[in-house]
Image (cartoon, rainbow, N blue to C red):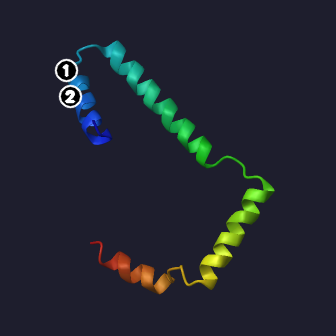
Amino acid sequence: MDLQTRKLHFIQEFLRLANDSITDKFEKMLQQERKNIVEAEISSMTLAQYEKRIDVAIDDIKNNRVTTVKKLKKEISTWK
């Protein structure tokens, strides 16, 4: 069963719940997991990781794997 199907099954079961306590627990768990994800994403980098990101960025520029502000604005204008 793929992730999307699992989510739909979970939502269906969740909607059948008539218990505030269980809903509270799910809310707290979701908040904590979101917090954990954010903290993991913004955790400090080592100097080696930072230097690696710089090297990748420089390589992207040299190999034209970048988007100019002008191109980005043009693309964004089509999103509406």
Q: Residues within 10 Å of mark 2 (few under 14, many from 20)?
A: few
Q: Residues within 10 Å of mark 1 (few under 14, many from 20)?
A: few
Q: Position of residue 57 (x, y in %)?
A: 64, 73
* Residue 46 vertical position relative to residue 75 in the rendered view, above or below: above
Rounded to the nearest whole Å, what is the CA distance between mark 2 and mark 1?
7 Å
| Residue farthest along the front direction in this orientation | 1
Q: Position of residue 70 (x, y in %)?
A: 46, 86
Secondary structure, mark 2, is helix
Locate the N terminus by quadrant.
top left
- Looking at the rendered structure, the kind of residue marked 1 is Arg
- Looking at the rendered structure, the kind of residue marked 2 is Gln
* Residue 18 vertical position relative to residue 14 in the rendered view, above or below: above
**Image disc number at residue 16:** 1
Secondary structure, mark 1, is helix
Q: Position of residue 28 (x, y in %)?
A: 45, 25
From the image, tell me which residue sits under label 2: 12
Which residue: 24% across, 18% down? Answer: 17
Which residue: 25% across, 38% down? Answer: 5
